[in-house]
Amino acid sequence: MGSSTSHLSKENVSEYQELTFLTKQEILLAYKRFMELYEDKKNPPDPRVSRVSLDKIVKLPELQSNPFRERICHVFSTSELKDGSLSFEDFLDLLSAFSDSATLEIKSHYAFRIFDFDDDGTLDRNDLEKLVNRLTGETDDTRLTKDEMGQLISNILEESDIDKDGTVNLSEFQHVISRSPDFVSSFKIVL
């Protein structure tokens, strides 16, 4: 292995392969990318505890133009500080969930968590409005009018809210996603 992967043992790589949807090459490439972002170049990171800041992660070209980049980091971050920083293992979890090999169930689970802005386990009107604004852009030129937004959210809830409680829960979300064949192919990040 080259110098950028010399601190990732074969046992670690094998374990990560078993726990993710990533190949050995993808894991080694992820480690190389993580090392490029890691600040302390002289001391290799411990994959379980060493962290890269949210500011550095969101500047990755693969995330830079994603309107949910901060939410993605917050969902995958195990930081006790809730700062969106990622350990290498968090980074692998993120890449695994967004990989082509991840199942629809995994992808829809993480998409739901990313879209659940208030982390309450449901997508309510506020979450849906934030979701639509992120997708359409939050400028005056692209923002929907209040009436347009209200109608769109009502339409989304009409299609998705099976139990008619005014919110979309994970199983309702997964039901909608299961009818969308393009979802799996559009929900990916490739290094």
Image (tube, rainbow, N blue to C red):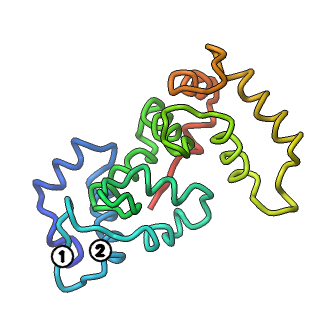
Sequence-first disc among 1 and 2: 2
- Residue kind at label 2, given as amino acid type: Met
Which mark is drawn over residue 97? none
Q: Is residue 84 above or below residue 131?
A: below
Residue 176, position as x, y percentages in the image: 62, 24
> What secondary structure is marked by label 2?
helix
Total marks placed: 2
The residue located at (21%, 70%) in the rendering is: 5
Q: Can you tell which quarter of the image residue 54 is in? A: bottom left
Give neighbour class at mark 1: few <14, some 14-19, many 20+ (Cα, 10 Å). Answer: some
Q: Nearer the viewer, residue 166 or 72?
A: 166
Residue at image mark 1 = 44
Q: Quadrant of the C terminus?
A: bottom left
- Residue kind at label 1, given as amino acid type: Pro
Residue 95, position as x, y percentages in the image: 40, 53
Q: Is residue 115 above or below residue 170?
A: below
The residue located at (66%, 46%) in the rendering is: 131
The residue located at (48%, 33%) in the rendering is: 121
> Left or right: where does residue 5 sit relative to residue 119?
left
Q: Verify CB contact (< 8 Å) between mark 1 and mark 2.
A: yes
- The CA distance from mark 1 to mark 2 is 8 Å
Q: Which residue appears farthest toward the bottom when viewing the image?
A: 42
The residue located at (20%, 79%) in the rendering is: 3
Residue at image mark 2 = 35
Q: Quadrant of the N terminus?
A: bottom left
> Left or right: where does residue 3 sit relative to residue 130?
left
> Left or right: where does residue 148 sit relative to residue 8?
right
> What secondary structure is marked by label 1?
loop
Q: Which residue appears farthest toward the top when viewing the image?
A: 163
Q: Nearer the viewer, residue 65 or 189?
A: 65
Give neighbour class at mark 2: few <14, some 14-19, many 20+ (Cα, 10 Å). Answer: some
Residue 98, position as x, y percentages in the image: 46, 47
